[in-house]
Amino acid sequence: VPVIGVLALQGDVREHAAMVESAGGRAVAVRRESELAAVDGLVLPGGESTTMSRLLETFELLGPLRERLAAGLPAFGSCAGMILLAKQALDGRPDQHQLGALDVIVRRNAFGRQVDSFEEDLAFAALPGGPLHAVFIRAPWVEKAGDGVEVLATVPGADGTGARIVAVRQGPVLATAFHPELTGDDRVHRLFVEMVRDAATTSETEER
Ligand code: GLN
């Protein structure tokens, strides 16, 4: 059973842990470097990305997490977690840290100009079983995705503007602008648990 850490500095940690367990992983809270070192994958929950970026520094996790991500640690970021994983955030504070694990530019609070929070049924590529009910809370969107980034879900733009990217995958890194931990549907977490399993198998093969 893959051991999946949930970054437990802030945000909806308990909900993610429950979904990881429901999806077949073993969930552990990650607050220190030694705990980070012991996981096969990491969930970065929603919350407030500026605060979380500051807490990563305070808990001396910023450097170690960047290193593990650069070495291929599978990660799943939701909302603020997506913002942290991105290489660049627009409308962020200048002192906000980026983990740079996803070749995307995100825009913070992007839907906020229209509406703070909303729910929408999404067609989500790579998930079995029909549309996914998605809850957006002061959500970002992906403004620009690099060539290696797979777009998994979009929402239609308001007033004839283009569709907005709200879920992406790049190799072992998955991110959603919305909160799959809040709906009782564990398919996104199942996808992530599968990605963690695949990454483990690949690295074992490489070691041989
Ligand atoms: N608006 C928050 C941020 O910019 C994210 C909100 C969320 O995670 N629900 O960090």
Image: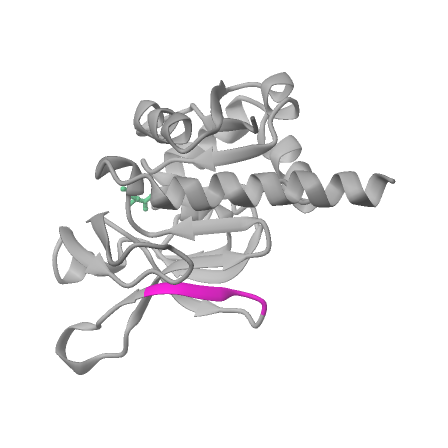
- State which quarter of the image contains the C terminus: top right
Q: Residue at x 34, y 25 (%)?
A: 18
The one nearer the camera, 134 or 77, is: 134
Q: Which residues are magenta?
A: 148-153
Residue 134, magenta (yes or no): no
Task: Report the side of 201 relative to 207 (left or right).
Answer: left
Extreme residue in the front direction = 129
Task: Report the side of 34 relative to 168 (left or right).
Answer: right
70 w.r.t. 41: above or below? below
Asked whether residue 81 is in view, the answer is: no
Task: Report the side of 47 relative to 58 (left or right).
Answer: left
- State which quarter of the image contains the N terminus: top right
Q: Residue at x 61, y 31 (%)?
A: 40
Main SS of residues in magenta: strand
Q: Residue 44 appears in which quarter of the rendering?
A: top left
Residue 149, magenta (yes or no): yes
